Every structure is written in structure tokens, then in C-alpha cells.
Image (cartoon, rainbow, N blue to C red):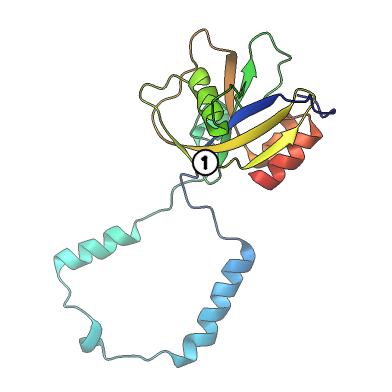
Amino acid sequence: MCSQAAAPGRVFGACVFERLPLVVPPHPDWEVEHSRWRFEWNLPYFKKYPADFIDEPRTEETDSAVAASNRWEPAPLESEADRSGDVRSLKRRLDQRVFMLVRRKGGSGAWEFPAVEHEEGETIRGSAERALGLTLVQEGLQPFFVGNAPAGHVETGEGTTFFHRCQMIAGTLRLVPGGPYSDLRWAAKDELPELVQDQALLDLFQKML
């Protein structure tokens, strides 16, 4: 798509298919420092109760439970897909939202969100749902479209494209055999400038995603 004057009357529905974060991201430095400061500020006001008032009697079972809790480790942020550069894997950028981009068969090789032209009698969300259905095999896939209103729109030389958010709940990903797309990948928001060349689209995605 290019960022020229919009062709009158043509409307497209696009599906922004996303995988939500799988692990909790690390807290930023300012939040860690603020939590430490609050703890130290409140420390003089803590009350110390007698040990026999609050401590449970120690047994082999409770000692084992405490030891097990101390062995807990947070999930790693970097996965094997990150280390190997596998952009088709859902197991990448685990602490961030990632978005599915596709390439059209016989096209320019540009990455884009799945989109179809709106048909008469169809809602814009219906167009986005159809775009996803033409892209991925629906059997075993559980998508969730967020609301009925699009998250954003942009005018291009082809017309006006409306983008609907859709989250992946469960399932496996398989491109529809004989469908319009030849390849897919998952990209985090900060990777989009390397993949999307149209500045109007990039400006919208920075606000929308």
C-alpha cells in the first residue's frame, strides 16, 4: 500500500492478529527504585510481633514447603526462538505483544496485515474476520475479535483500510492452502519500522498498537 490520495469508494477490512504477552515483563528501574524507597520509608512504622504469636510450629512438611517456594525462579524472557531468530514462532518476545504479518503470493514481498476488500452487506468487522479466515486454517484455531469498532483506519492509494484487533486465544497456525499469502511472521511493535515501508501506516500503528 502507498500513501497517495485515496481511491474513492474502495474500503478494506484488515485483521490485526496478536498474541498477548506470555510472561510478565520486568519492572522498569524507576518502579523498582520507588518500591524500595517506599519499603524503607515505612520500615520504622512496622510492628514486630512475638514469634510465638505469628510463627507456625515448624515441621518437616512446612520446612519442605518453604524450601520449595525458595526454589522458584521467574520464567526466562529470552526463548529458543529469540536465540535462533525464528520469526515464525509464537514463542518469541514472550514479554511483549507480537503481531502477525503476512506476504502476498506474487506480490512485492512487503509485509502487511491480512486484508480484503469490503463487500456489500458486510460489516467492516466481518471483512476483517473474512481476511483472517482466508489467511489461516480456522479448524483448531480460537481467535477473539476485540469489539465491533475498528482500532484505526488509514487512507492509501488503494482506498481506506480499517484495522480490527483480534487476539489469539489458543490453537495452531497454518496458512490456508491455496490462499492469497505465502508466508507469515510475528513482529513486536518496535520491529515494525524495519518491515513496513509506508510512513502513514507506521504512524497509525505507533498510535494504534
Q: How many marks?
A: 1
Kind of residue at badge 1 = Asn
Q: Is residue 157 above or below residue 155?
A: above
Q: Residue at x 35, y 25 (%)?
A: 140
Residue at 46% in and 44% down: 22
Identify which residue, 204 or 96, lies in the foreground.
204
Q: Quadrant of residue 188?
A: top right
Whether residue 112 is visible to the viewer of this picture, yes or no, is no
Q: Is residue 13 left or right of residue 144?
A: right
Measuring from the top left, give residue 42's x and y in whole percent.
50, 86
Q: Is residue 4 above or below residue 60?
A: above
The percent position of residue 54, horizontal first and vertical second, equals 24, 84
Q: Position of residue 93 (x, y in %)?
A: 55, 40
Examine the rendered structure and indicate whether residue 16 appears above or below residue 151.
Answer: above
Left or right of 134 in this view: 191: right
Residue closer to the observer: 75 or 195: 195
Label 1 residue SS: loop
Q: Is residue 174 left or right of residue 82?
A: left
User: Is residue 142 in sight in this rendering?
Assistant: yes
Q: Quadrant of the C terminus?
A: top right
**Residue at x-position 62% and y-position 35%:** 163
* Foreground of the two, 184 or 135: 135
- Percent of width and height locating residue 129: 50, 28
- Picture quarter with the N terminus: top right
Give the labeled residue for mark 1.
148
- Work out whether 73 lies above or below 61: above
Q: Residue furthest front?
A: 121
